[in-house]
Amino acid sequence: MNTFAPSTHTYFIAGRPVPSVTQVIREILGDAIWQASDWHKERGQAVHAAAAFIARGKKFEFDPQIAGQVKALRRFFSEVDPVVLDVERQVYSERWQYAGTLDLLTQKPGADALMILDFKASLTLSVAYQCAAYALAYPGRVIKWGCGVEIRENGTYQMGDIYDLRKYQQDWLNLLGSYNVRRKCGIKEDVV
């Protein structure tokens, strides 16, 4: 059975803890990609929760500190009008022994193909690896496309590049392999 412990942000496959997609990317690619204080992480969690409520069409209350991001999210969903297929989905790769939570599964605009959207405070190339990891772990579906969406404090959003995730899946597996080698060598960074 696959489970998630929110208090420690730990994913388990068959009772065994496995690394998260974010944990692997953060440790291997480093702080150049992930520069966030605890306050920024908490704000990011609140923004992601707001995105999930909006995607599901639910009403919610939010802290005024994220009012700009909520405005940006509402604008995104109104203007882009994505076909929402899945929201905040935990995915587990039993084959590769990792897990994570994707933000949004939708259809690629103008196509029948599936696309993962990942909401970010700022866009970096790491979103391609992150989406590729989610695509590999998503059960029973082939997901070829991924895109980051920058959600800004000023109430605007910016769609990033649309990535062909097939080009990034091997790189993701290389990152995961590097992470696992570090563990075998006793090199461990506790990042959540």
Image: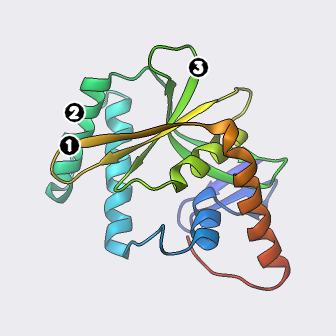
> Compared to 26, does 68 lie above or below?
above
Q: Are the residues flagged by discs 1 and 2 in contact, CB closer than 8 Å?
A: yes
Earlier in the chain: of badge 1 and badge 2, it is: 2
Tell me the mark number nearer the camera, choosing from 3 and 2: 3
Q: Nearer the viewer, mark 1 or mark 2?
A: 1
Question: Residue 128 placed where, x, y %?
Answer: 56, 47
State the separation of the CA atoms marked 1 and 3. Answer: 26 Å
Residue on which the image places disc 2: 75
Residue lying at 37% horizontally and 47% vertically, measured from the top left: 49
Residue type for callout 3? Ala
Q: Is residue 47 left or right of residue 61?
A: right
Residue type at numbered disc 2:
Arg
Where does residue 161 sit, x and y in percent of width and height?
Answer: 45, 39
Q: Nearer the viewer, residue 3 or 39?
A: 39
Q: Which mark is residue 113?
A: 3
Number of the label disc, if any, that sits on residue 156: 1
The crowd level at tag 1 (other Cα within 10 Å; few <14, some 14-19, many 20+) is some
- Given residues 18 and 170, the one toward you in this image is 170
Q: Cα distance, mark 1 to mark 2?
A: 7 Å
Question: Neighbour class for label 3 at 10 Å: few (<14), some, many (≥20)?
Answer: few
Q: CA distance from mark 3 to mark 2?
A: 24 Å
Find residue 132 and report its horizontal and vertical position in percent. Answer: 64, 44
Q: Secondary structure at mark 2?
A: helix
On the picture, is 89 further left or further right than 150? right
Check disc 2: other Cα within 10 Å, few if <14, some if 14-19, many if 20+: some
The number of discs equals: 3
State the residue at coordinates (81%, 47%): 94
CB-based contact (under 8 Å), mark 1 and mark 3: no
Q: Earlier in the sequence, mark 1 or mark 3?
A: 3
Element marked by disc 1: loop
User: Can I make out residue 46 in this image?
Assistant: yes
